[in-house]
Image (spheres, helix red, strand yellow):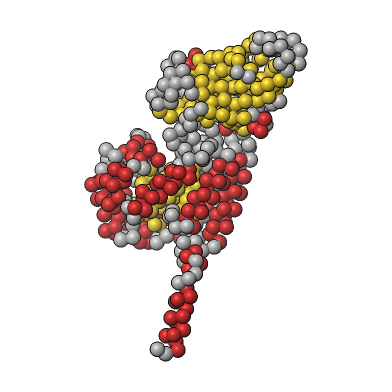
Amino acid sequence: MNLRSALLLVVSVVAGFQPVLAQSPVRGMAADYASVIQEGTPRADGSRHLDTGATLAGIRDLKANTYFYLVHGQRDWDDLRNEFLPAAAKARLDVWLYFVPPSECPAPCALPYGEDYIQTAAETAKLSLTFPNLKGMAIDDFADNVRLYTPEYVGRMRDAGRAVNPSFQFYPLLYWRSMLPDFLDKYAPVIDGAILAYRDEPTINTSRNSSLRAQLDGAEAMLRSRSKGLILMIYCAPLGRIPIAPDVAYVRDSLAMGLADVAAGKLVGVVTYKLSKSGLPAPDAENYAHTGHGRATILASGAGIPAGSYAELSGHYTATSGTPALLFWSTALYTKLPPGYFFLQLLLDDRQVWERDLATMESKLWNQERVELGPLPAGKSEGAFRVRLALKKTTGSISVIAGLDDLETEGLTLQDPGFENPAKWTPAQTAPAFLPMVQWFDPQRPTHMVDAVRELYGRFTAAPTR
């Protein structure tokens, strides 16, 4: 053995004992999706188009290395080909195309190739030959459209893409409810991985992430056993039917968990969804308080929620003088709600002093009521004031929200009658389908959220990861 060979052997042996992260120069995906910035004025066609420069600047400011570009119609497709992809290539930004399924594209929505996703895959792959930074395509709400997306159809779709570019990849978006072994077994031969859109199922919200670790572990194991990749999607905006915006801590903590798994080789990447990059404050429409910035909110969402379960917010009251009474504003949000199920209740300690069937409250409207609380027990000067949403019949699949605000008291005082200080209220629930909270509107939430994502992505993309 000559000296050069010996040295190479020593180097290779030493390298074998280095940590995996130190060996690999490959970085995982730190991505963003949707929420493009549009131009301020319409073009000659009468439409406001994508502001490519501003959108790219926002993505790069996040320290993201990948962007999922939403195609919801012909204009999106044209802006992509003519403007966004060339600029993203110069910026060394990886791009995935994200298409809506038929369920999200009723007339007059028209995708560039209609419902022919086989041709769509081939055309996407053609673009990737010109722009190698275009890595693949994804389809939203995949499992809700399996009448079209049969395993045979998806196989033809991916084959059409790979016939043009053998590196073409396809990732469907799946929710936790669809991460089932039988479902994955059917589609594993024709997909390259999946995107898990996390929603704390079965409750469905973007405020609580206590189930994320277990769901990530489960999804990672199922995809890994089938030699498929997994991308975690974190919502940065309210769900369509659940108008409760995630707070900064939720996004930061969820994203940090995902990035740690990317660094450990368990995930392909993470992607933020609907992260506002405009620099503008949150719209006033996101403030659901009656007045001020806070209100009591109790969400119940799921299927088969058992009768007798409830959730509540508990605060402290102190008796003053006279007969206790309360003036307050209440509201509810629901689509279809039969009577006799959900009841908004007020309690002093464990004594119920008022209740209202949510089905008798007109959805989305605030209503003011006054209730006499009755005399307190002799010698009672303080205790717990409770706002409770109680269920009296087991449900099917349902989603309701109850709200309370602007409490005015007589004969007692409350520490935070306007729900402006979440720390003054203690949440509790007897079933996971409930989510009680002080819903507090922060106009600077989008800015703070971008700051948090930038910090996490900046640390992640600055160092090699597996």
- Answer with the quarter of the image where residue 149 lies: top left
In-front residue for pair 329/98: 329
In the image, residue 436 sits, relative to residue 137, either above or below, namely above
Name of the residue lying farthest toward the front: 379
* Residue 294 in the figure: left or right of residue 204: right
Residue 370, position in %: x, y?
A: 64, 12
Considering every residue shown, the one lying at the far left of the view is 152
Q: Quadrant of residue 306?
A: top left
Q: Residue at x 37, y 58 (%)?
A: 128
Residue placed at 44% from the left, 53% from the top?
267
Seen from the viewer's position, the closer of residues 164 and 297 is: 297
Residue 146 visible, this orientation = yes
Above or below — where is 262 with respect to 247?
A: below
| 278 sits left or right of 188 in the view | right
Q: Is residue 122 above or below residue 432?
A: below
Above or below for 5 versus 214: below
Q: Nearer the viewer, residue 198 or 138?
A: 198
Residue drawn at x 49%, y 69% is: 18
x and y, in percent, of residue 318 in the image: 72, 20
- For the question of whether residue 44 can be seen, the reply is no
Residue visible at 51% across and 24% down in the picture: 310
Residue 156 appears left or right of 343 = left
Residue 327: x and y, percent?
A: 66, 15
Q: Residue furthest right?
A: 321
Residue 404, given in percent of the width and then of the height, sits at: 60, 22
Quadrant of the image containing the N terminus: bottom left
